[in-house]
Amino acid sequence: MIISIMANSIYDLTFTNNKGESVALQKYADKVVLIVNTASKCGFTSQYKGLEDLYKKYNAQGFEIIGFPCDQFGGQEPGSDTEIEQFCQLNYGVSFTLSTKVEVNGENTHPFYQHLKQQAPGVLGSQGIKWNFTKFLVAKDGSVKKRYASATRPEALNDDIIKMLQA
């Protein structure tokens, strides 16, 4: 079921973290937020390290990351929420927020991802997420500013993150 969204910013939305708690994105107001759909058995899984490095480098300056595990691309995120968290912590030291597993495409797309895709379409206006580790950078005002392809390494976002933190 597709839900129509009338949100001006991500702060009008909520998600469920991997502990089963509802999180109002208003909690992230006045912060720069990187949103990433993740998977533990993907060729891009090593990006968790780069994401954690960004998080550690900029978190004290008002930067957050939220990982949204997704199993829609080749079944590459088969674990439970607990297994995903353990994998991320054990292998990459992940300390940023993870959500429960979500769908980012199709009729069961999480409303949060509907909003992201509407605000920052992909190549040629495509709204679909093409693969794991697609990234969205959100400004302090909650507007979605930029979308990055899966192959974009986290460290390539440094300049954009710095500019947004200084804005």
Image (cartoon, rainbow, N blue to C red):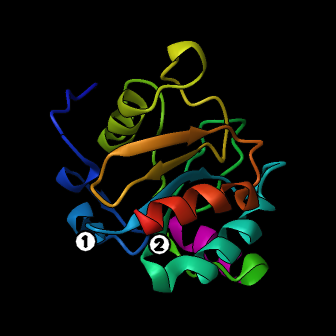
Q: Left or right of 64: which side holds 22? A: left
Q: Is residue 83 above or below residue 151?
A: below
Which dot marks residue 70? none
Q: Is residue 84 magenta?
A: yes
Residue reaching furthest bottom?
60
Q: Left or right of 40: which side holds 119? A: left
Residue 19 percent coordinates (x, y):
39, 75
Find residue 156 and report its image quarter.
bottom right
Q: Nearer the viewer, residue 19 or 45?
A: 45
* Range shown magenta: 81-89
Q: What type of secondary structure mainly makes up the magenta span?
A: helix
The residue depicted at 48 percent of the width and 29 percent of the height is 105
The residue depicted at 48 percent of the width and 37 percent of the height is 104
Question: Pointer 2: residues within 10 angstroms few (<14), some, or many (20+)?
Answer: many
The residue depicted at 60 percent of the width and 44 percent of the height is 71
Q: Secondary structure at mark 1?
A: helix
The residue depicted at 72 percent of the width and 47 percent of the height is 76
Amino acid type assigned to the residue bearing label 1 in the image: Lys
Which dot marks residue 63? 2
Earlier-in-chain disc, 1 versus 2 = 1
Q: Left or right of 152: which side holds 105? A: left
Question: Pointer 1: residues within 10 angstroms few (<14), some, or many (20+)?
Answer: few
Q: Nearer the viewer, residue 103 or 92?
A: 92
Quarter that holds the N terminus: top left
Q: Left or right of 109: which side holds 74? A: right
Amino acid type assigned to the residue bearing label 2 in the image: Phe
Which dot marks residue 27? 1
Asked whether the viewer can see residue 45, the reply is: yes
Asked whether the viewer can see residue 99, the reply is: no
